[in-house]
Amino acid sequence: MQFIIFIVALLVIFILAYIVSNGKKKIKAKPVITMVVLQLIFAFLLLNTEFGLIIIRGISSVFDHLLAFAAEGINFVFGGMANEGTSPFFMNVLLPIVFVSALIGIAQYIKLLPLIIRFLGLLLSRINGLGKLESFNGVASAVFGQSEVFISVKKQLPHIPDHRLYTMCTSAMSTVSASILGAYMTMIDPKYVVTALVLNLFGGFIIANIINPYEVTPEEDIIETFGERKQSFFEMLGEYILDGFKVAIIVGAMLIGFVALIGMVNGIFESAFGITFQVALGYVFAPLAFLVGIPASEVVQAGTIMATKLLTNEFVAMIDLGNIASSVSERTVGIISVFLVSFANFSSIGIISGAVKGLHEEKGNLVAKFGIKLLYGATLVSLLTAAITGIMLG
């Protein structure tokens, strides 16, 4: 039965992508099928094998150590501010982003990250049916995040055709930044964070191949990146540390605003209709939750969290998932966890268009124009990742 639901889920997701495709006759089946198979292989390895368990444990251990190192700096500045036995979200989840951002800056400065990103991008371009620039951007998005990634291609940005820019933005919204992975791992199981990171990378290319198919000529297929001015080591380090702190502050501010607004809307709905706004949305998203493999008895709870993530952000939804985790099955927790690991929400439209506009106003306005279609595609990527995970959890 699960296998049948999985096949139906794939068909529904692909049909939803096909409906809005701007080049239905140009869709190439081979790269789509190849990448779905790769998703299944990677999901199986990460979730169902000893080899995958070793990888997950290794990555988790690295981030555990990084979070411990980050705690030294946090405790030095903020030690004693929290009551004994409490675990403030801002200090324990968000502030470690500052330290991880500094490490990313160092890896960038010594040219390690550009080398890795170029290699993986070139490798992916051989199988995803897209250009080297799109492949490079997909990998870079998983490192730098949805706003910073466009800085790495700012030299080419004015010359990137509209259709290629859509694909690049889809990758940016479908993945998450490396600096924030440690924060996710404090809220959901690390194995789901890593699994989602890998599957979303392929998923972004799969959905883009259906919604936005095109050919890239050899003359177009060039990459001009990392052309920023030369900085001293400590100038760079200070910049990345401040960038990390800005991310922590921005996420914290968004959480304050969104959680408060949800509380207010829930209160109004409950007074008027006897049901909270989130639960009402849960019924709307319940069919999608069932499609990706959530048990029928838990689809409303799962749909509520899926809707919360779309309307607010992944952190708000992860908090809600933590609140219900003990009352639902491990299968539901796993499927919803991978669905949450992406930037696919309404606020990301403004973040991405603003980031691009800061580099090139005309291109930024274009991104804002196709913002809803961008979110639509990125949400399909999350659904695809959830469906792939569902069939692997058994």
Image: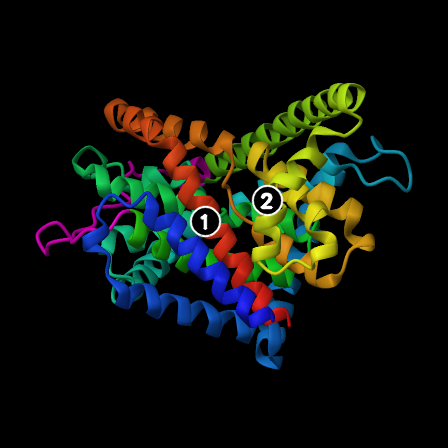
Residue drawn at point x = 73 percent, y = 62 percent = 330
Viewer-nearest residue: 19 or 359:
19
Q: Is residue 1 left or right of residue 207?
A: right
Q: Return the residue at label 2.
A: 99
- The amino acid pointed to by label 1 is Leu
Q: Quadrant of residue 232?
A: top left
Mark 1 Cα shell of 10 Å, populated few (<14), some (14-19), many (≥20): many
Name the kind of residue labelled 2 in the image: Phe
**x, y percent for residue 52:** 58, 75
Residue found at the far bottom of this picture: 50
Kindly identify which numbered label has been placed on residue 135: none
Question: Front-most of 57 and 331?
Answer: 331
Vertical order, 343 against 28 (above or below): above
Please state the horizontal and vertical placement of residue 230, each as a whole percent of the image.
Answer: 30, 39
Q: Answer whether residue 233 is magenta in the image.
A: yes
Does residue 170 appear left or right of residue 186 in this picture? left
Residue 200 position in % (x across, y down): 46, 55
Please give left or right for residue 280 compared with residue 208 in the image: right
Residue at horizontal 65 percent and vertical 69 percent from the top: 57
Compared across the picture, whether 144 is left or right of 82 comes to left
Examine the image and state in which quarter residue 37 appears: bottom left
> Residue 380 got which mark?
1
Bounds of the magenta span? Answer: 212-236
Q: Quadrant of the N terminus?
A: bottom right
Among numbered discs 1 and 2, the one appearing first in the sequence: 2
Q: Secondary structure at mark 2?
A: helix
- Considering the whole magenta stretch, tell me its main secondary structure: loop
Whether residue 109 is visible, yes or no, is: no
From the image, state whether disc 1 or disc 2 is nearer to you.
1
- How far from the left and from the top, in percent, is residue 97? 59, 42
